[in-house]
Amino acid sequence: MNLNDRKFVMVSSTASAVDPDSPTEFHYWESDGLVWGSYTGDTVIQGRFVGTREGEDVRISYVHALKAGGTAGGRSSSRLETGEDGLLRLVEEFSFEGDDTQHVSVCTEVAG
C-alpha cells in the first residue's frame, strides 16, 4: 500500500457541509514513509500538507487558504482502509490550531 500519486475526495466531515458536486479534492505523494500533497475544493482555495505514514496510520500537519477569507491550519491522524472495491479510504480525526474540538472526515480514493 502506497499513497504516491493517489487522489481522494471528501465525502463527509463534521467540521463543515461537503458539496457533493464540488468536494474538496486531495492529491497525495509518498516516499519512504514521508507523505505530502495539496488540496482544493468547496471551502478551500489552496491547501498543503506534510507528514508521515507508518502502516495504516497517516499523521499530517496542514494549512489552507479559505474561500471565505483567511487561513486555517492544524493536525490530523488518519486510518487508511481498503474498501471492497479495492480503492483506499482515509478516516481522519483532525483539529484546527487554537481549537481543541475533534472533527472527523472521510475521504475516498478516486478511481483512476
Image: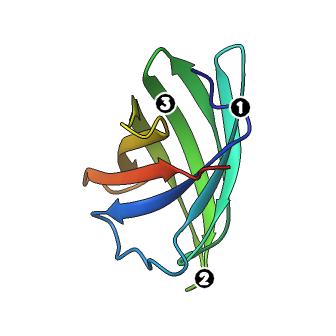
- In the displayed structure image, the side of residue 57 where residue 35 appears, left or right: right
Instruction: Report, in whole angstroms, how far the alpha carbon at label 1 lies from the one at label 3.
Output: 15 Å
Asked if the residues shown at circle 1 and circle 3 are in contact, with their CB atoms under 8 angstroms apart, the answer is no
Image coords of residue 53 (percent x, y): 54, 21
Few, some or many residues within 10 Å of mark 1 (<14, 14–19, 20+): some
Asked if the residues shown at circle 2 and circle 3 are in contact, with their CB atoms under 8 angstroms apart, the answer is no
- In the displayed structure image, the side of residue 102 where residue 85 appears, left or right: right
The kind of secondary structure element at disc 2 is loop
Q: Earlier in the sequence, mark 2 or mark 3?
A: 3
Q: Which residue is mark 3?
A: 59
| Residue sitting at x 46%, y 50% | 108
> Where is 92 relative to 99, above or below?
above
Q: Nearer the viewer, residue 36 or 27?
A: 27
Image coords of residue 105 (percent x, y): 35, 54
> Where is 41 relative to 79, above or below?
below
Q: Earlier in the sequence, mark 1 or mark 2?
A: 1
> Which amino acid, mark 3?
Arg
Q: Earlier in the sequence, mark 1 or mark 3?
A: 1
The kind of secondary structure element at disc 3 is strand
Q: Which residue is mark 1?
A: 4
| Residue sitting at x 57%, y 20% | 1
Q: Nearer the viewer, residue 100 or 87?
A: 87
- In the displayed structure image, the side of residue 14 where residue 89 appears, left or right: right
Q: Which mark is residue 29?
A: none
Q: Quadrant of residue 25?
A: bottom right
> Where is 70 relative to 83, above or below?
below
| Residue sitting at x 60%, y 55% | 63
| Residue sitting at x 32%, y 66% | 15
> Which amino acid, mark 2?
Lys
Residue furthest to the bottom? 68
